[in-house]
Each structure stands twice: as C-alpha cells, then as structure tokens.
Image (cartoon, rainbow, N blue to C red):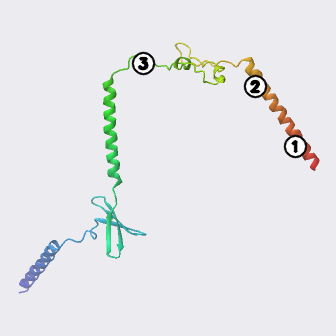
Amino acid sequence: MRSATSSSTFLISLGAAMLIAGGAAAAPPMPDGENGRYAMSATPDGVLRLDTRTGAMSTCSNSGAGWACYAIPDERAAMDAEIGRLQADNEKLTAELAARGPVVGKIDEALPKSDALPKDESQPKSDSLRKPEPKAAEGERKIEIPLPSDRDMDRMMSFLEKAWRRLIEMANRVQKDVNGKI
C-alpha cells in the first residue's frame, strides 16, 4: 500500500503544480507601470514619464482633481520633417542646375577692378592715388608686389623720426620726475 500512497501523493503534487502553473498563465496581466513599460523620473512639478515602447514623453502632475499626464511635443518629428523638406529642396535645385547646362564664356580669373567698374567721380581722391593692384604673371600664379616709392619711404622715415624723438622726450621727462622726487 505504500506504493499506492506514494504514487497518489506524486499525482496530487503533479496536479497541484499544473494548477499553479495554469493559474499563473491565466492570471490577468499586470498593469503597464509594473511591467516596465513606463520609466518615471521625479521633477519639481511632478513626474516625467517615458513610454519605453514608443519613446513618447509626458509630464504628470497632481492637481486638485487627481493625477493628469500631458504629452510633451515631439521635436524630433519636426526636425525630421525639416530635414526632409531641405533634402527635397536640395534635389530640386541640383536638378535645376544640371538642366541649365554649361556656362558659355566663363573665365577662371576675376576681372581687374579697373575693368570691372567704371570710374566714378564720387570716389575720394585717395582712391585715384592708389597704386594699381599687383598682377599675376602670365602662365604662372605668382603675385608681383611693387616696391614702395621714394615718396613713401620719406613719409615712413619722417614718421619714425618723430616717434623716436617723442619717445626720447618722454623718457627724459620720466627721469627728471623720478630724480626730482627722490
């Protein structure tokens, strides 16, 4: 009889295990907040709620009528729309540019200023005294820099002489002030 008792005990325990497992499978699902769908983060005004399935964010606050959650506008969607608009605009402009064909008569170098614009009397006289722009040598891309004229050198030397004299005078005044006070 011992064998019958142990086999019946085994069958009873097996049935109980099946009932427990079946009961767990038939149990109602847990609320979304408990199974990890939402991630909550405390804020000074309430709670920030992140839907982990959709990525939508909401702010939740406790008002006098109870807790209420309001969706935060999704800026990513607006930026994606702007990117799409700009890409379409870029494709349109690229197609227009390709449809125009090559430009006839295009030159690689810019025109000199004297040829590009007519001489205007309203320009100051200093522009008329300006030296011509340095020109590129034919066949090479080297810039020729003109040397200063004798007049320019004289003006520069005069300026340096005056500046040197003023510096020496200032040093002498400082030395006299220091000697007189000590």
Amino acid under disc 1: Val
Is residue 53 positioned above or below 92 on the image?
Answer: below
Amino acid under disc 2: Met
Looking at the image, residue 50 sits to the left or right of residue 149; the answer is left
From the image, tell me which residue sits under label 2.
Answer: 156
Q: Earlier in the sequence, mark 1 or mark 3?
A: 3
Amino acid under disc 3: Lys
Q: Earlier in the sequence, mark 2 or mark 1?
A: 2
From the image, tell me which residue sits under label 3.
Answer: 106
Check contact, mark 3 vs mark 2: CB within 8 A: no
Count of residue discs: 3
Q: Earlier in the sequence, mark 3 or mark 2?
A: 3
x, y percent for residue 72 = 34, 60
Q: Which mark is residue 174?
A: 1
Name which residue lies at 34% across and 45% down: 82
Dot 1: element: helix
Query: Foreground: 169 or 23?
Result: 169
Name which residue lies at 86% across and 39% down: 171
Check contact, mark 1 vs mark 3: CB within 8 A: no
Looking at the image, residue 170 sits to the left or right of residue 120; the answer is right
x, y percent for residue 133 = 60, 19
